Amino acid sequence: MLEPAVIVLRLMQYAGAMILLGSPLFFIYALPRSGAASAAQTAWARPLLAGAGALLAIAALLSLPVHASILAGSIRDGVKPETLVAVLTGMDLGKAAICRAGAAGLAALLVLVLKPGLPSWGLTAALGAVAVASFAWMGHGAATEGPIAPLHLAADIVHSWAAALWLGALAVFALLLLARPGTAESVAALHRALHGFSGMGALLVATLVLTGLVNSAILVGLDRIEGLWLTPYGRLLSLKILLFMAMVGLAAANRYRLTPALGRALETPATESSALAALSRSVVVEAGLGLLVLTLIAWLGTLPPPSAH
């Protein structure tokens, strides 16, 4: 009964944290610092970040009584103060949840209080990085023992950071495209952002592949490779890899076909609408696949990996 709640709360935390780290960094390195095309001039930048912080903080706090109830064997015993204190003080996931909720709540407050701009985005991204890193203590990353434990923990954190940078940027791209850039300046800024993200995207994909291989080697094991299709964890991991490959394919199409098409449309405005529509469809599908990947990650964190058998 409580396991679906754990998965939903994990998904909410992942989604909030990806935006809290990846989106403000994208504002900084990809969008103009000022002018109509800057993030500070959009109507949705501050609500996006504040909403992501609030979502993450609430879900992290709600996860505490849920985990306590699983530990105690019932909801009634799980909400007892002594059980909650045990989770908070005696379990890494409890400490990580409090750290995550604090970072997310502070980020949401700063977004609402500070003037939109580089300092606000930078502080928000820094707090988002703390929140994302804390996920390693919510899943399998911090459970590994022995000499390989530091490598697994580091790979898990870097993997999460890379995913947040990609998905947070993807959320911004989707919003920019769905808002339908109304001026030549905003379309040109979007094209520069798409073109500029290409190099970053390639680096993020390489990082995700490398750290993913490290994590898979530890959690599945080269001597248990059949676990990829014989265990629930392995089958979900295989599906996650397929969805990731589909996202990479869409990202490549954006970079090598749709982004150049938008560049050409800047010189021939008659084709601008169709170029933007094609990009919108591709980015929305890619974002949808990203959400499915996050759902699978939330589910995977509740299952024992093949290496545990």
Image: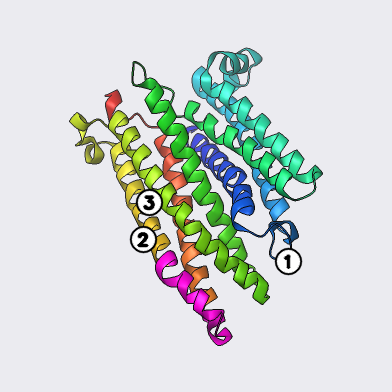
Report the front residue among 190 and 51.
190
- Other residues around mark 3 within 10 Å, as few (<14) / some (14–19) / many (≥20): many
Q: In the image, is residue 263 part of the stretch drawn in magenta?
A: yes
Residue 197 inside the magenta-drawn segment: no
Q: CA distance from mark 1 to mark 3?
A: 34 Å
Q: Say which label, 2 or 3, has the lower sequence index.
A: 3
> Which is nearer the N-term, disc 1 or disc 2?
1
Q: Percent x, y for residue 287?
A: 49, 57
Residue 295 visible in this rendered orientation of the protein: yes
Residue named by callout 2: 249
Q: Which residue, given by chain and number where applicable, does mark 1 sit on?
A: 36
Main SS category, magenta section: helix
x 46%, y 36%: residue? 158
- Residue type highlighted by circle 3: Phe
Helix, strand or loop under label 2: helix
Amino acid at circle 1 = Ala
Circle 1 Cα neighbour tier, 10 Å, few/some/many (<14 / 14–19 / ≥20): some
Mark 1 vs 3, N-terminal side: 1
Query: Which span of residues is magenta-colored?
Result: 254-274
Q: Is residue 81 above or below residue 127?
A: above
